[in-house]
Amino acid sequence: MLLDVLQAAEAGGFTLIQDTVKCSGRGILKCFINAALKRGEDVHVLGFEASETEVCAGLDNSCVQKLYFHKGFPDPLGWMCRSSFTVDQLTSQHITKLIKDAQHAKASVLVIDSLSFVLRHHDPVVICQRLQELRKGGDIKMIISLLHSDLHLQGVVGIVSHLASTVISVAPANYEHHTVAMTTRRTKSGKVMQEEEYFSVSEDATLSVQAKSRQSGHVQKEQDVAEADPTTNLTFNLRLSEEERKAKEKVALPFVFSQEKKSALLRPTPGSGRIVYEPDASDDFDEEDPDDDLDV
Amino acid sequence: MFPELNSILNSTPDSLKSSDFILVSDRQADASFLIHHYLSFYLRAGCKVCFLGLVQSFSHYSAVGQRLGVSLTQAREKGQLVFLEGLKDSIGALLQEESSQGTQPLSYLRSPAAGLKGLFRFVESSVRQNGGRDDGESWGPPVLLIDDLSVLLSLGVTVGAILDFTLYCQATVCSELQGNMVILVRCEEEDADDDEEGSNLLQRGLVHQCNLALHVEGLPTGYCRDIHGQMEVWWRQSGETMYNQRKIFHFKVYDKGASFFARGTSSAVL
């Protein structure tokens, strides 16, 4: 499914790539940029955390003219007064103007690297509203962004993931040099599809999916040796015969309150002790049984 | 300078890697011996060093530096070392009469919410200074050392402001000037509500940005007289490939150095 998302050309999509310290998602982001460039689309990159050379390294040289890198990186907050794009300028009017200035009326792809930086400086709700405006605006075909999910509260990550039509979470796999991507895709009809795949990114920013992982959540090493039966080869007997098993099942467990025990307890036995209680003046003696409402 | 650490990290004063952002962190241990290592390493390599010493006095580093074979006083006089003594200058910053420019290096002491722009300006100006050596040559690529960054959290600076500061430093020192950066961060015990603003969040944010992360902890099995702790080396390649490599070494700190060895090969064991 990862390759489908990479090549898909649906309009109004928002793809979110989530990564953690254990595994960086920039490789996949670069694959997305490369795929969009190869399709002939304009790619506008809002770079806040990585430099232009880093983002453009390995991309196809013939299509690099269609890549517009809006330099947030050396100065994303305007401290040095020499940035061309600050984080405050991420508004729908400004972005639409930037895209129209690029003079190509074709579909544009907006890449945000990274959304974590933006969320550090602006309210998540405001950012989600702006992203939604950009999606519905019509000038942008697709928005792709990177989010470091371990740097935000879970709620914030959840808000942004809900907005996205596709969420790709990358994580390291059990054995070295492999990374796992869990792709969750929500179609327009509301159907949600999920898939987990091993993938790798090559030097020239192409994605190759190795194999589909097994049941998600179970990444076990192959057990070559079948589990041995531990009750064989012992000097004592651990097995039960039929009668022994029946007798075991008949045993009444001590703390289980079964019907027989209850009736045995409630039956008054002759000669048992009786408790005589004389309340004195300051005692608040309530005749009601406090356990009356218990259904035992 | 610890020769064994140099061979583990594959770098010597003569063959430096440039544009490196090295993060040194610790959890319930003391990783400041690595800061002393890097200080002597870069001074020996002839680099221009800007050191933000926020937690100890200059004489402390100078005394340890002498044991490792470098003289910090001489380096400072020659102009190779720019030292911001946080402890001594903080009194002056707090007692200043006029509410002067917010661009003073320690302006975060008076208004922590305003961020670390002043500190960054100090770093930028000291790193861009072109003062040459006595023999006419210029110093090597600039190096920024910070000891330690997590103390700013307890002074009221937010994690976001610190991460912005390190991003700007990385942009200037590593990307633009091809220099190196070494930052020490001290983390607290992992809590259940780990999403809260704190040193763990700061450490994760810095690991995302860095090239090499050295994490020092005590041994998981407890105290040992012969092994002072374990150090995890995490090589993170920025951007292209996602294949990181992590290795754990044990170390023992001596009076004049530290020795590093693979797990299980301590001299007390073999």
Image (cartoon, rainbow, N blue to C red):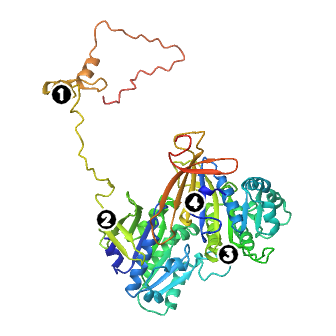
Task: Name the spot of residue B198 as percent of width and height, x first.
Answer: 60, 55
Q: Which residue is mark 1?
A: A240
Rounded to the nearest angstrom, the CA distance separating label 3 from label 4 is 39 Å
Q: Residue furthest top?
A: A271
Rounded to the nearest angstrom, the CA distance separating label 2 from label 4 is 43 Å
The mark closer to the camera, 3 or 4, is 4
Q: Are marks 1 and 3 on the same chain?
A: yes
Q: Which mark is residue B7?
A: 4
Q: Are marks 2 and 3 on the same chain?
A: yes
Q: Secondary structure at mark 4?
A: helix
Mark 2 surroundings: few (<14), some (14-19) or many (≥20) residues within 10 A = some
Q: Which residue is mark 3?
A: A79
- Which chain is indicated by disc 4? B
- For the point 41% across and 66% down, the residue is A162
- Which chain is indicated by disc 2? A
Q: Amino acid at mark 4?
A: Ser
Query: Dividing the picture into quarters, in which one does residue A118 lie?
Result: bottom right
Q: Are marks 1 and 4 on the same chain?
A: no
Q: Which mark is residue A195?
A: 2
Q: Are marks 2 and 1 on the same chain?
A: yes
Q: Secondary structure at mark 3?
A: loop
The mark closer to the camera, 1 or 3, is 1
Q: Amino acid at mark 1?
A: Leu
Q: Residue furthest front?
A: B270
| Lower position in the chain sequence, tag 2 or tag 1 | 2
| Lower position in the chain sequence, tag 1 or tag 3 | 3
Q: Secondary structure at mark 1?
A: loop
